[in-house]
């Protein structure tokens, strides 16, 4: 049985299978293909404690287009929201559905669910990890700029949040370098093996093939909003920072975006084609993940 709980420990060969499925799903969308029936007769639970737009829609559409039926469950609608143990919810869900997609706060909750449900489980975001997003980002980068091996990605902003945490693991898998430009309080948990950190965002962006950012105030951190906006003010992706990267550098944002904060309105609109292609590719990559999960 396969799960996608985190990127740590994944082999490039496995990741390449997922990306290959994603490429086929994008190419063949709207036409009958093998992936379209991969979930035929299956019901998948989407258990979301955190709000979602792209992740929820992409998984719901992916499951339906692959022949399955998604059932969405928010924490407020099920007993988890009233204190039922994750392991007890998991034991019940494992007897009723064929797989689960979970978006929540604690990474340990996703791991515990997978252990006790004994059904394929996908981490759709936790405070520590965002593997689906990062696999989709790799798909986008290679679609637009070719092989990612040897390229430099510069992540600017909160380098301690789930996106750069997963990028750190992806750098090991795919052989790219990751330069994080972040305040010292928000530096990446791991450096070395192609991962570096600097407090100077221009240094991080210098010569980058890809500039990447995320919101400064992640879900659950709203009480820190005022402090974070002051600390991260010098870490905006704007014209000045883009000029430090390579001339044809991609600008990516996993969205939602707050114009005038982590990215300037001008840059977001100028690079909107790439950023919203990145968002669309969540659908195709979720299909790739699901196809890999259920394949022998």
Image: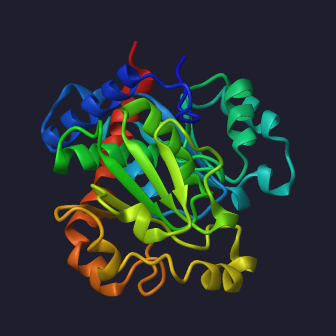
* Figure disc tally: 0
Residue 2 in percent (x, y) is at 52, 21
Residue at 27 percent across and 37 percent down: it is 22
Between 274 and 58, the one lying in front of the other is: 274
Residue 96 in percent (x, y) is at 63, 30
Between 125 and 29, the one lying in front of the other is: 125
Residue at 38 percent across and 24 percent down: it is 12
281 w.r.t. 21: above or below? below
Instruction: From the viewer's perspective, tell me whether residue 246 is left or right of residue 156.
Output: left
Residue 133 in percent (x, y) is at 44, 49
200 w.r.t. 57: above or below? below
Instruction: From the viewer's perspective, tell me whether residue 186 is left or right of residue 29.
Output: right
Q: Quadrant of the N terminus?
A: top right
Instruction: From the viewer's perspective, tell me whether residue 293 is left or right of residue 224.
Output: left
Residue at 37 percent across and 64 percent down: it is 205
Q: Quadrant of residue 264?
A: bottom left
Residue at 27 percent across and 30 percent down: it is 21
């Amino acid at each position: 049985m396969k799960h996608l709980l985190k990127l740590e420990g994944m082999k490039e060969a496995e990741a390449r299978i997922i990306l290959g499925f994603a490429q086929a799903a994008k190419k063949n969308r709207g036409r009958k293909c093998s992936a379209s029936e991969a979930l035929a007769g299956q019901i998948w639970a989407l258990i979301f404690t955190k709000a979602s737009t792209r992740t929820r829609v992409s998984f719901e559409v992916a499951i339906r287009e692959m022949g399955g039926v998604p059932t969405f469950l928010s924490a407020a609608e099920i007993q988890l929201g009233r204190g039922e143990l994750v392991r007890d919810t998991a034991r019940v869900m494992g007897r009723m559905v064929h797989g689960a997609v979970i978006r929540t706060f604690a990474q340990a909750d996703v791991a515990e669910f997978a252990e006790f449900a004994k059904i394929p489980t996908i981490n759709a975001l936790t405070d520590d990890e965002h593997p689906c997003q990062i696999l989709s980002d790799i798909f986008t980068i290679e679609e637009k700029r070719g092989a990612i091996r040897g390229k430099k990605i510069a992540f600017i902003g909160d380098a301690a949040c789930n996106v750069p945490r997963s990028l750190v693991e992806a750098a090991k898998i795919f052989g790219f370098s990751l330069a994080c430009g972040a305040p010292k309080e928000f530096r990446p948990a791991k450096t070395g093996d192609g991962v570096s950190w600097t407090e100077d965002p221009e240094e991080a962006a210098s010569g980058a093939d890809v500039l990447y950012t995320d919101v400064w105030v992640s879900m659950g951190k709203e009480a820190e909003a005022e402090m974070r906006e002051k600390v991260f003010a010098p870490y905006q992706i704007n014209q000045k920072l883009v000029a430090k990267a390579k001339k044809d550098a991609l600008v990516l944002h996993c969205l939602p975006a707050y114009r005038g904060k982590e990215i300037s309105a001008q840059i977001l609109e100028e690079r909107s084609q790439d950023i919203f292609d990145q968002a669309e590719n969540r659908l195709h990559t979720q299909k790739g993940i699901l196809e890999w999960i259920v394949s022998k």
